Amino acid sequence: MAADDDTASPNPSQEPVGPPEPPAPEVSSSDLAALQRQLELAKRSGRYALITAIVSAVISASASAWSSIHVSSTGMDRQQRFAAAQAVRSNRESVYVDFVVAYSGLVGQLGRLRAALQLHPPDFVYLSSEFDKLFEPMQILLRAETAVRIVGSEMGPALARWDRTLRALTVGPESLEVVRDHLDQYRGRFTDDDQWRRISTVGISAIERFSTDTAVDEIAERAREDLGSG
């Protein structure tokens, strides 16, 4: 009976419980490498998203700051531009006035030289002295002309004509150069002869042409237009 009971009651430890477990899948080295690449790509994508978010925030903050600065400085820029324009206008006005004053100074000395050229008999000492006195007003005028060239607006054509007028006064066979050369050549032997009368006439004519030329009027007219008072 005991044997029958042993046969009817099997040992639970010897019999499997439930269905058998499937065998564990084998993972190849290529599968592991592919998995590692996917993980690395995921990490990189995460970093990229984070960096992109940070950069976008920085750009947005910078743009907002720049907008604030630009708005606050717009009024100041307008004021500075207006002040600069006023300063330029004031400088131009001063330069134009200085040029006209310098021109008047030269014309005044030319008038005195003309009076000396008209003396008969001529006074060599007086004539030479008046000639030498041309140097200072001429230098002042040339400096004033240079300033006009620097700050003047669209003065090119007027200044080109002015240059021709000034050159006709000082250089050439119909200019004061002829008078100066004659004084230097005949110093100490200066006489009131026909030659001198021709030379003095050349000088007087050169002064008259310069004094009646309208080149300076063109510069003055352009200056008035530039200053808005034409």
Image (cartoon, grey):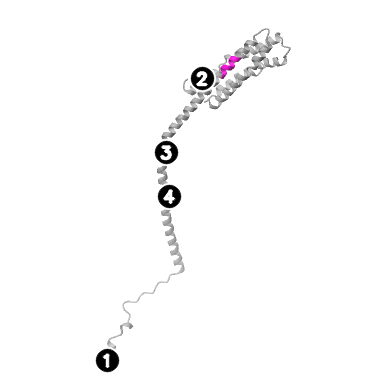
Residue range corresponding to the magenta coloring: 102-109
Q: Residues within 10 Å of mark 4 (few under 14, many from 20)?
A: few
**Tag 4 residue:** 55
Between tags 2 and 1, which lies in front? 2
In this view, the residue in front, 221 or 151, is 151
Q: Give the number of the disc on residue 178.
A: none
Looking at this view, name the residue that lies furthest to the left. 1
Whether label 3 touches label 2, CB < 8 Å? no
Quadrant where the N terminus sits is: bottom left
In this view, the residue in front, 201 or 144, is 144
Q: Amino acid at mark 1?
A: Ala
**Tag 3 residue:** 70
How many marks can you see?
4
Q: Residues within 10 Å of mark 1 (few under 14, many from 20)?
A: few
Q: Is residue 175 visible?
A: no
> How far is disc 2 from disc 4 in space, using C-alphas?
60 Å
Q: Is residue 4 visible?
A: yes
**Tag 2 residue:** 221
> How far is disc 2 from disc 1 in space, using C-alphas?
144 Å
Q: Position of residue 123 (x, y in %)?
A: 68, 10
Q: Residues within 10 Å of mark 2 (few under 14, many from 20)?
A: some
Between tags 4 and 3, which lies in front? 3
Instruction: Specify whether residue 214 is painted magenta.
Output: no
Q: Position of residue 189 (x, y in %)?
A: 73, 12
The residue drawn where x is 70% and y is 14% is 183
Q: Residues within 10 Å of mark 3 (few under 14, many from 20)?
A: few
The residue drawn where x is 55% and y is 18% is 101
> How far is disc 3 from disc 2 in space, using C-alphas?
41 Å
**Tag 1 residue:** 2
Q: Amino acid at mark 2?
A: Glu
In this view, the residue in front, 23 or 116, is 116
Considering the numbered disc 3 on the image, is that residue within a helix, a strand or a loop?
helix
